[in-house]
Amino acid sequence: MAQANETQETTRADETLKRTPLYETHVQLGARMVPFGGWEMPVQYPTGVLAEHHAVRERTGVFDIGHMGQLRFEGPHALEFLQWVTTNDVARLDVGAAQYSLLCNEAGGILDDVIVYRLAETRFLMIVNAANTDADYAWIETQLQRPGRGVDPARVLLERISPPRTLLALQGPKSVDVLSKLTSIAVGELGHYHAVESTVDGVATVIARTGYTGEVGFELSFDALHAVHLWNALLEAGKDVDTIPCGLGARDTLRLEAGMALYSHELTVDTNPLEAGLERVVRFEKGDFVGATALKAIAERGPERALVGIELVDRGVLRPDYAILVEGKPAGRLTSGGPSPTLKKSIGMGYVPVACASPGTEVAVDIRGRPHAATVVPLPFYRRQRRTRKG
């Protein structure tokens, strides 16, 4: 469900930060709290970012992702309206399935990346990024006033459901074992990008096999009244595999290794899906949608730049906004970067001209005024080993 997590994000000094239902719990656990997307969120616990990162790669970690926005769409024309406002083909979803998608403006610029779940024949859940929730909801409301595809606005119910709902993420190779202790459904048989409405430790929950770490995992949507209860229940159920709380810092290193885009970094209103490598979620064959005309034109002429993985060859650490150099001249900038705890390398993502986007292309990165040798590499940097089932 969740796509957002750089460790810092600009917040106005006069802006009142929101808090998830678990704020006091994080403080009691000694978390370091930082502003993110208008929220006060835990960046790390006393265990530290490295320990939290490795816990998710090797065992299991629990994240508070209650800052993410949740929207409900229901009614006879809900499907067609979602077809209008998102780039992917929602009609391909069976009940219980989910898809990654985008909201784009008329020029094809990315307003947000989202996940859409089909929970019933005419009922859908959309998860949006924390910093974009207000803007997304307002934009979708505007679209509902004058929708395309023959949608009758009176036959679509649009509702913002967070609050009162919140989200938790349980991520890591042991997540199936942990969650199985708290629910009667066979969560290990739940397919990737699928969801089911059930209960977790007695709490009505949408259980989704999704995540933002590159590992097996689940994201849980439920009434915020039960946030502390379920947080504690997950940690207790995971005691035997040393499940620990994890913050934004580990969430960012994990998603970077997995090559997952972050809105406001890889994705912005000034980027389009085709240069971001997301043509798979732009389905022209479904018919008209917001931004379709502009995106078709981009597809026909081809994007001018491409999002690539960058691996540092020289010693140093890649950081967002460092210049990417081709033949000594600036050709793009890093959108994300940092050390990879799993791979023991410095990695980053950024946009370069299409001619320089092939894996193996030698580039350099300007680190404090000095060029450091680097190489374009395929994404993702890290891919989990798929475990075969016995029997």
Image: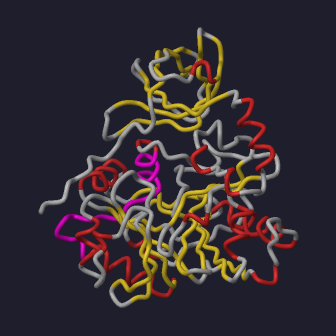
Q: Give the vertical position of 229 relative to 305 (above or below).
A: below
Say left or right for 120 vs 241. right
Residue at image position (43%, 39%) is: 380
Q: Is residue 246 magenta?
A: yes
Q: Magenta includes 264?
A: no
Q: Quadrant of residue 80?
A: bottom right
Residue 340 to residue 213: above or below? above
User: Residue farthest to the top?
Assistant: 327
Q: Position of residue 227 (x, y in %)?
A: 45, 81
Residue drawn where x is 81% and y is 78% of the image: 153
Type of colouring = secondary structure
Q: Residue furthest bottom?
A: 202
Q: Is residue 74 above or below residue 63?
A: below
* Main SS class of the magenta portion in the image: helix
Query: Does residue 189 appear to the left or right of 37 in the view shown?
Result: left
- Give the extent of the magenta segment: 237-255
Please tell me which residue lies in front, 309 or 168: 309
Place of residue 63 in the rendered image (x, y in percent of width and height, measured from the top left): 42, 65
Give the residue at the far right of this rendering. 146
Q: Which residue occupies the foreground of this view, 363 or 340?
A: 363
Quarter of the figure that contains the C terminus: bottom left
Residue at image x 52%, y 61%? 2
Q: Residue furthest left?
A: 391
In the figure, is residue 354 to the left or right of 145? left
Q: Determine which quarter of the picture holds residue 243.
A: bottom left
Task: Name the foreground residue: 11 vs 340.
Answer: 340
* Relative image position of residue 347 (x, y in whole percent): 44, 32
| Figure disc tally | 0
Q: Position of residue 367 (x, y in %)?
A: 54, 22
Q: Quadrant of residue 72?
A: bottom right
